[in-house]
Image (cartoon, rainbow, N blue to C red):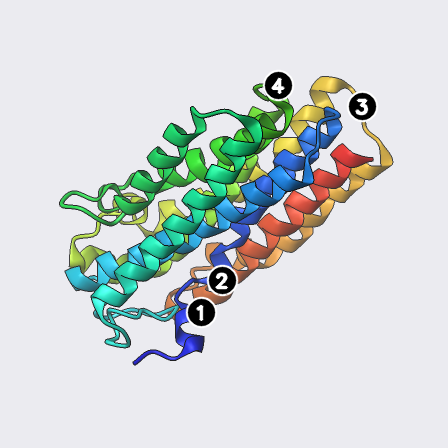
Amino acid sequence: MATRAQWMAATRPKTLPAAVAPVLVGSALAYNSGAFDPYLAMFAAIVALALQVGVNYANDYSDGIRGTDGVRVGPTRLVGQGLASAAAVRRAAFGAFEAAALAGLGIVLLTDNWWLLLVGARAIVSAWFYTGGKKPYGYLGFGELFVFIWFGLVAVNGTVSVQTGALSDWRGWVLGSGAGALSCALLVANNLRDVPTDARAGKHTLAVKFGDRATRWFFTFLLVAGMGSPLLISIVEGRVDWVDLLLVIPFGLAHGPGRRVLAGARGMDLLPVLAETGRILLVWSLCVSATLLF
């Protein structure tokens, strides 16, 4: 029987910044447009967090029953390590998805935008079939695309849209791409660690397809592109204020994980990279939000 601490560890807290960060940026954009709504922002954050927890539990369940998690390094695997039954983990995943659906329904009721139900349903289906079903797309190398779309473009622009009642301007797409790239860097760091075991288990992630060396450079590219995305806005708008200096902070934080990955860290030595990348994403979102608020 898994302990409460093991259930919490299985939510993979190091990945949760991928849920919070785009909502922070999207809410800051809404504020910048004069339409910030704290209740809608709160519901959007709950949706994102619940989806992230749900996909993590669903990944634990699906990889566990396939035997992919039989030999792993890294976070707790409830099913793979025999700590909880597959049925219990599946219930936890669907419980998280239900929480996301209820929070999403709250947004629908507050905004009267019923079409959002279709977006929410699609998000939950995509989250489940990441590693679930007969042909999970996460096993085919499309996991990064899912993360880029749902935890980047959709999360940022969706947060803006529900608060302003309109689609975001071009800045939302730039910053959504930045959040998506950094969220992908989280996934790439995780998959780089698991390349040997994933390859043996037939899980053909993008890291397995790219190979070790190319994946390390891909991780570096995602970090730099994601962190640099707000600078494009400053260049296009032709303004550089004192608050824009905050955008340098994430680059300083990225030195450690970037150097470690390019130096060839493997296995357990990559565990700190996941935490550091999550920290970079969260700090980046706070810095970007500050540039939009002041």
Q: Nearer the observer, disc 4 or disc 1?
A: 1
Q: Which of the two labelled residues, at mark 2 and mark 1, occupies the earlier sequence position? A: 1
Q: Amino acid at mark 4?
A: Asp
Residue, disc 3: 239
In this rendering, the answer to whether 95 lies above or below 294 is below
Q: Which of the two labelled residues, at mark 4 and mark 2, occupies the earlier sequence position? A: 2
Mark 4 burial class by Cα count in 10 Å: few <14, some 14-19, many 20+: few
Mark 1 lies on a secondary structure that is: helix
Residue, disc 2: 13
The answer to whether marks 3 and 4 mark residues whose Cβ atoms lie closer than 8 Å is: no
Quarter residue 214 falls in: top left
Residue found 72% across the figure and 24% down from its top? 33
Q: Amino acid at mark 3?
A: Arg
- Quarter of the figure with the C terminus: top right
Residue, disc 1: 8
Mark 3 burial class by Cα count in 10 Å: few <14, some 14-19, many 20+: few
The span from disc 4 to disc 1 (Cα, nearest Å) is 38 Å
Q: Amino acid at mark 1?
A: Met
The span from disc 3 to disc 4 (Cα, nearest Å) is 18 Å
The answer to whether marks 2 and 1 mark residues whose Cβ atoms lie closer than 8 Å is: yes
The span from disc 3 to disc 1 (Cα, nearest Å) is 44 Å
Count the marks: 4
Mark 3 lies on a secondary structure that is: loop
Quarter residue 268 falls in: bottom left
Q: Which of the two labelled residues, at mark 3 and mark 4, occupies the earlier sequence position? A: 4
Residue found 65% across the figure and 54% down from its top? 253
The span from disc 2 to disc 1 (Cα, nearest Å) is 8 Å
Q: Nearer the observer, disc 2 or disc 1?
A: 1
- Quarter of the figure with the N terminus: bottom left
Residue, disc 4: 169
Mark 1 burial class by Cα count in 10 Å: few <14, some 14-19, many 20+: few
Mark 4 lies on a secondary structure that is: loop
